[in-house]
């Protein structure tokens, strides 16, 4: 099976968001829509609201973390990336909405101030509060970057901001209130968005299905990284090598946040394993405080980052630091049933001591009969790895090969840009970045 | 994308801040220098019949005498309020196309 950049999901999103524009042109109007400058501004003010609200609805839908979306986007990572882009576009359009209405509905600066501030009109106030809250929360999310638990808590209020905005759409006299097809579409889409929000947040405990596992072993790989082994308490989660899962440990010493981790175990193993590096508040608690017999709730698996989903069986795998984890699962699994793969694995790390799993990888390479070639790259010794070095070090170059990368985002971006410049087809370059 | 969003957020606040600032330098009563007729309640209330019907909405005065027959909500909804201030009921019922239409009947500014 092969996959490239699956654009069908993104195309469908744009169709959903722009369809209200089509409906709006069918909505009756007793005055010209674009007769003079004021009408033009007013019409665009209405259109920005229609598209902005639609985008906001779809943004909430994408945040529901439904596995079905992975089929229409290139994995959950891309779903979240589109969620962020769409949310920002929605904000931009919704900021323009009141500004573009000013020339038509006000004739002085004082009136404009009264229009922009909360007053006696309840429906208008809902719109003002919704936009204000959205601005504040998105600013925090994008630019202040608070700690994860604070960010997650504040981010949930965007659902409330959308609720206020939907109420504003419901109540305000407008083309939407007057033209039934448009009203049904916009409010219907908003209702779906709110349902998706409630599914993931308020009703998540009851509706989102999770696997129950227990921590059976914690193995310290070095000063910063531990490998956690989890055994199932009930149903076993099936996964494809290279996928990841969201884990929530029910351990008061660690906290109950849910975080994504790549699966390290091979497809033939009954237990699930993850490798956790001490990188911040939560992972430091996990590395230092997690105890065996702690119960874990697991949601997944997610992701399309797998050798099984590539165009070619000749592949180059590039791991940066703890990004080696999905490749461990892939390396353990790849030759169990199929010996036609040819893999060059570049394992890059900063300094000696950070090279976890090297012995395991060397054993797998020796057992593969030469089908897996391990390239160790220590940046303290050799400097930064680049695409040209990789192309020169791989027998036969990069032609007709798929490239998989899991590394810090700057490393991925630099390598990807150069691979594209070298003429590699986009559908043969795959990357996994955790930007949740 | 984040840089683009930041640009528009700053743009939004610059525009809104500009409007607020200008409203301090150009308060509403200065707009009357544009030679627009000004009415008070005593004058408006004289125009309270079906054939001579003024309404006050959002501090503006409208002569809707020629529109009454076309009103989708019926004649009485307007004629029962000729010569009065009707901002509240107008804003709560009417769509934005009605607001657009209203501008055609504007005749001046209202002062208390």
Image (cartoon, coloured by chain):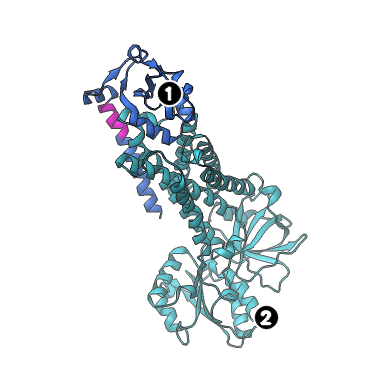
What residue does disc 1 label? B87
Frontmost residue, B54 versus A414? B54
Residue in the picture at 36% in, 47% down: B8
Q: Label 1 is found on which chain of the structure?
A: B
Residue in the picture at 67% in, 80% down: A336
Residue A119 is situated, as x and y percent measured from the top left of the image, at: 44, 27
Q: How many marks?
A: 2
Q: Secondary structure at mark 1?
A: helix
- Rounded to the nearest angstrom, the CA distance separating label 2 from label 1 is 77 Å
Q: Does residue A384 appear to the left or right of A364 in the view shown?
A: left
Q: Can you say which quadrant of the picture contains the N terminus of chain A?
A: bottom right
Residue in the picture at 37% in, 26% down: B66
Q: Main secondary structure of the magenta part?
A: helix
Q: Label 2 is found on which chain of the structure?
A: A
Query: Colour in which chain B is shown?
Result: blue
Residue B96 is situated, as x and y percent measured from the top left of the image, at: 43, 35
Determine the image quadrant of residue B29. Answer: top left
For the magenta stretch, what is the residue range?
Answer: B19-26
Q: Which chain is cyan?
A: A
Establish if A312 lies above or below A293. below
């Amino acid at each position: 099976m092969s996959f490239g950049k699956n654009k069908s999901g993104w195309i469908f999103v744009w169709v959903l968001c722009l369809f209200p524009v089509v409906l709006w042109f069918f909505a009756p109007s007793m005055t010209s829509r674009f007769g003079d400058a004021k009408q033009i501004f007013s019409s665009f003010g209405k259109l920005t609201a229609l598209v902005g609200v639609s985008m906001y609805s779809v943004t909430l839908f994408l945040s529901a973390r439904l596995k079905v979306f992975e089929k229409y986007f290139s994995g959950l990572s891309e779903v979240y990336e589109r969620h962020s882009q769409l949310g920002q576009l929605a904000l931009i359009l919704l900021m323009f909405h009141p500004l573009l209405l000013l020339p038509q509905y006000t004739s002085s600066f004082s009136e404009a101030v009264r229009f922009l501030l909360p007053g006696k009109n309840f429906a208008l106030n809902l719109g003002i509060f919704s936009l204000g809250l959205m601005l504040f929360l998105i600013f925090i999310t994008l630019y202040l970057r608070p700690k994860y638990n604070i960010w997650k808590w504040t981010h949930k209020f965007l659902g409330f901001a959308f609720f206020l905005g939907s109420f504003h759409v419901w109540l305000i006299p407008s083309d939407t209130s007057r033209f039934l097809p448009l009203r049904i579409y916009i409010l219907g889409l908003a209702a779906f968005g709110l349902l998706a929000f409630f599914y993931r947040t308020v009703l998540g405990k009851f509706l989102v299905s999770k696997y129950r596992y227990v921590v059976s072993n914690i193995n310290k790989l070095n000063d910063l990284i531990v490998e956690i082994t989890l055994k199932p308490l009930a149903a076993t989660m099936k996964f494809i090598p290279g996928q990841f899962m969201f884990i929530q440990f029910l351990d008061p010493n660690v906290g109950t946040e849910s975080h994504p981790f790549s699966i390290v175990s091979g497809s033939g193993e009954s237990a699930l394993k993850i490798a956790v590096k001490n990188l911040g508040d939560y992972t430091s608690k996990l590395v230092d405080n997690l105890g065996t017999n702690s119960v874990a709730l697991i949601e997944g698996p997610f992701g399309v980052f797998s050798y099984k989903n590539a165009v070619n069986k000749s592949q180059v795998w590039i791991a940066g630091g703890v990004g080696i984890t999905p490749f461990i699962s892939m390396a353990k699994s790849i030759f169990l049933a199929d010996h036609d793969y040819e893999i060059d694995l570049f394992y890059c790390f900063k300094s000696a001591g950070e090279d976890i799993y090297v012995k395991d990888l060397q054993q797998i390479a020796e057992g593969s009969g030469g089908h897996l070639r391990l390239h160790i790259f220590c940046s303290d010794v050799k400097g930064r790895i680049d695409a040209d070095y990789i192309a020169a070090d791989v027998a036969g170059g990069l032609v007709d090969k798929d490239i998989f990368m899991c590394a810090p985002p700057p490393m991925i971006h630099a390598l990807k840009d150069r691979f594209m410049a070298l003429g590699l087809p986009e559908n043969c370059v795959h990357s996994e970045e955790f930007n949740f | 994308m984040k840089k683009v969003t930041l640009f528009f957020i700053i743009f939004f606040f610059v525009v809104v801040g500009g409007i607020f600032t200008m409203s301090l330098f150009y308060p509403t009563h200065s707009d009357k220098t544009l030679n627009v007729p000004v009415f008070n309640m005593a004058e408006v209330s004289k125009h309270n019949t079906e054939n001579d019907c003024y309404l006050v909405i959002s501090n503006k005065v409208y002569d809707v005498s020629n529109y009454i027959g076309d009103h989708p909500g019926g004649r009485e909804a307007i004629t029962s309020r000729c010569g009065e201030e009707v901002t509240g009921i107008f804003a709560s019922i009417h769509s934005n196309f009605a607001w657009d239409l209203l501008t055609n009947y504007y005749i001046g500014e209202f002062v208390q």
